[in-house]
Amino acid sequence: MILSWRNRRAHNNKMKNNNRLCEDLDAEINVPTHFRCPISLDLMKDPVTLCTGITYDRENIERWIEAGNETCPFTKQVLETFDLIPNHILRRMIQDWCVQNRSLGVERIPTPRIPVSQCEVSEVCSRIVAATRRGDGKKCGELVRKIKNWGKESERNKRCIMKNGTACILSASFESFARDSFEKHINLLVEILSVLSWMSPLGKEGRSKLGTESSLRCIIWLLRNGDLSGRQSAVLVLKEILHSDERRIITNTLRAIEGVVEALFFLIKEPISPTATKASLMAIYCMISSTTKNDMITSRFLEMGLVGVIVEAIVEADKSVCEKALGVLDEICNTEKGKEEACNNALIMAVLVRKVLRVSEWATELSVSILWKICDEESVRIEAIQVGTFKKLLVILQVGCGESTKEKVKELLKLLNVYNNRVDCCVDSSMGFKYLKKPF
């Protein structure tokens, strides 16, 4: 006991000494005022000067200008030009100061890369158009990689690239080489998709180029046969194509392409990343919501066991994945076969009740909608009572919800009230599902 007390006292003394040392260091490091950004008051990493002569950190002043401000934050003068001139002299002074104070724990700021300009992006895009017309895949690949590397450097570069209509040009190039022979140009097409995957929105013209049969066949081929990075890029682009007003037309085109259902299904059953899983769920939702109730695409998803896979995915999914998975399940239950598959799933009732009021308001509304659709048969209603659905529905009314959800809750309570006193609640809806396979 004495030893334990002494150890604890020694530990407390050590922590006090460390805190005192940190305070001494803070007191010793006196950052010069002209090294601080007037906006954030932090040490500048990439100082740039406005036309008013005031220097700011690039990231902060760009955010200020992009917010729609047309004045200098410090002088309040109206800006005649938005040009940002790098202040190399001040940046070198800051780097020298960092080196001098290295013993106090100050790290030297790296020399920033010069951000790409709109003129540079426009020039490269023009060269991509010319290379595409010539059918020069090698040159086109070099230029696409240049854009890709620019995008990797900073978010600012990505925004500059997207402003120049690059997505439309890359989409046209993708469609051209995919139509020629996508096996011959597969490496180039993978590079183009990797850039398009972070460009959103793609624009109407860009989506129309990527929505052609030749483009879609290439995307689906990559979705099935590409490496992990290629598959993720392909599904992200496919999601963007389908998430538009033309999704019914695109879905009709996809219907003739072999393997699209299987590729999307296995991205959920055997996930490669949360990003790819969410994109797959959104693509599936767009496809089944734009078709008729007895469409072959929806039927194929059900035959492969999509309901069971989604129910397992929902169990421990994060908020975003859970909402998208519930959205797909709700859409599936609009079909008779989908409703039948859901009713036959042994876990769906307990999983849905568990997610009510525990994920988000939207997830609760979707869960109620699914319950409302599947509680047709007596056996399903009895199971609903057993997992505590009746109590959860009462809580929803007390907490509050939308009018549409409220009406469904009331209808469900009327249906379940008949069995409420006759059936024992023998399953706790908050159980951990530890016996389930965890796909995430």
Image (tube, rainbow, N blue to C red):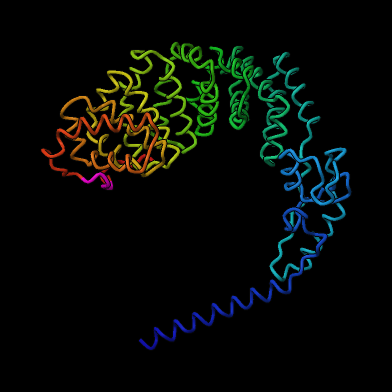
The image shows a total of numbered marks equal to 0
> Of residues 208 and 425, which is closer to you in this image?
425
Q: Is residue 430 magenta?
A: yes
Would you say the magenta stretch is mainly helix, strand or loop?
A: loop
Question: In this view, which residue lies farthest toward the left?
Answer: 422
Where does residue 235 sit, x and y in percent of width and height? 50, 27
Q: Quadrant of residue 193?
A: top right
Q: Quadrant of the N terminus?
A: bottom left
> Of residues 219 and 317, which is closer to you in this image?
317
Please report the residue visible at 83 percent of the width from the left and 60 percent of the height from the top: 34
Where does residue 299 sit, x and y in percent of width and height? 33, 17
Please report the residue visible at 27 percent of the width from the left and 27 percent of the height from the top: 342
Where does residue 213 sit, x and y in percent of width and height? 53, 12
Q: Quadrant of residue 94?
A: bottom right
> Of residues 408 and 368, which is closer to you in this image?
408
User: In the image, is residue 160 above or below residue 41?
Assistant: above
Q: Quadrant of the C terminus?
A: top left
Q: Which residues are magenta?
A: 428-432
Where does residue 362 sit, x and y in percent of width and height? 42, 36
User: Is 145 left, or right, of 123 in this rendering?
Assistant: left
Q: Is residue 93 magenta?
A: no
Please report the residue visible at 25 percent of the width from the left and 35 percent of the height from the top: 349
User: Is 421 left, or right, of 238 in this rendering?
Assistant: left
User: Is 431 left, or right, of 66 in this rendering?
Assistant: left
Question: In this view, which residue lies farthest toward the bottom?
Answer: 2
